[in-house]
Image (cartoon, rainbow, N blue to C red):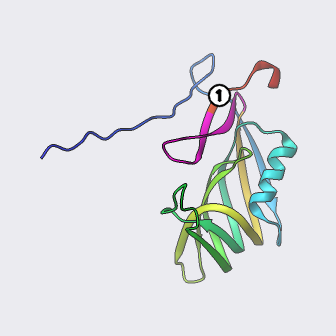
Amino acid sequence: MQKEPIRSELLFFSQSSSGGGSGLQVHVVRLHPGQELLGSLQAFVEEKRLRAPFIITCVGSITKATLRMANATATCTNEVIHLSGRHEIVSLVGTLNPDAHLHVSLSDSEGRTVGGHVLGDMEVFTTAEVVVGEAVDLQFTREMDLNTGFPELVVQPRSQTEK
């Protein structure tokens, strides 16, 4: 039995005069108890006018969160869980353009982990220390992808007038 070849599409963008990609700017945000993590990060990105922002690292804790699970599809997006109680943020990754795409892993008091696509409602418990990077020569946007049914990342060079 012959296997079908695996199809893959590689999203790759590299731009600079030296061929080394985009320049990097680093920002640090500390969120306080009661702040909503996703909305606060989106407000920071808007305030700083970041065009290609992404999460470098994050540590902290939350008291609630709303996550979409991996088995959700564009036509069945109700695969959502609502967490409450104290959880440690053990990983937060993704892009922070206006249609942010973040995934989080959270652990409870017994070390059990759960993760998913961040929909919001992530209330900070003690702190959230977030290091945000920006690819200063690029711009991130999202466009609907007919194959996935979701808005997917589009990477473009930032025009000289926007730098």
Residue 161 lies, in percent from the top left, at 82, 20
Where is residue 4 shown, x and y percent of the image?
24, 42
98 sits to left or right of 146:
right
Q: Going by the image, does 14 lie left or right of 119?
A: left
Residue type highlighted by circle 1: Gln
**The one of 84 and 3 positioned closer to us in this rendering:** 3
Q: From the viewer's perspective, is 107 left or right of 127?
A: left
Residue 104 is left or right of residue 134, and the answer is: left
Whether the magenta-drawn stretch holds residue 128 is answered as no
Q: Which residue is the site of mark 1?
A: 156
In this view, the residue farthest toward the front is 75
How far from the left and from the top, in percent, is residue 19?
A: 56, 20
At x 72%, y 48%, the residue is 132
Question: For the C terminus, which image quadrant?
Answer: top right
Q: Which residues are magenta?
A: 136-154
Question: Magenta stretch: residue 144 in it?
Answer: yes
Residue 32 visible, this orientation? yes
Q: Residue at x 75, y 21 (%)?
A: 159
* Residue under the point 75% across and 36% down: 51
What residue is drawn where x is 48% and y is 43%?
147
Q: Position of residue 12 (x, y in %)?
A: 52, 31
Give the quadrant of residue 41.
Answer: bottom right
Position of residue 26 relative to residue 109, above or below, is above
For residue 26, what is the image quadrant? Answer: top right
Decide: few, some or many residues near mark 1? Use Cα within 10 Å; few <14, some 14-19, many ≥20: some
Relative to residue 5, is residue 120 depicted above or below?
below
Residue 163: in sight, yes or no?
no
Q: Nearer the viewer, residue 6 or 44?
A: 6
Q: Is residue 101 above or below residue 2?
A: below
Residue nearer the viewer, 42 or 89:
42
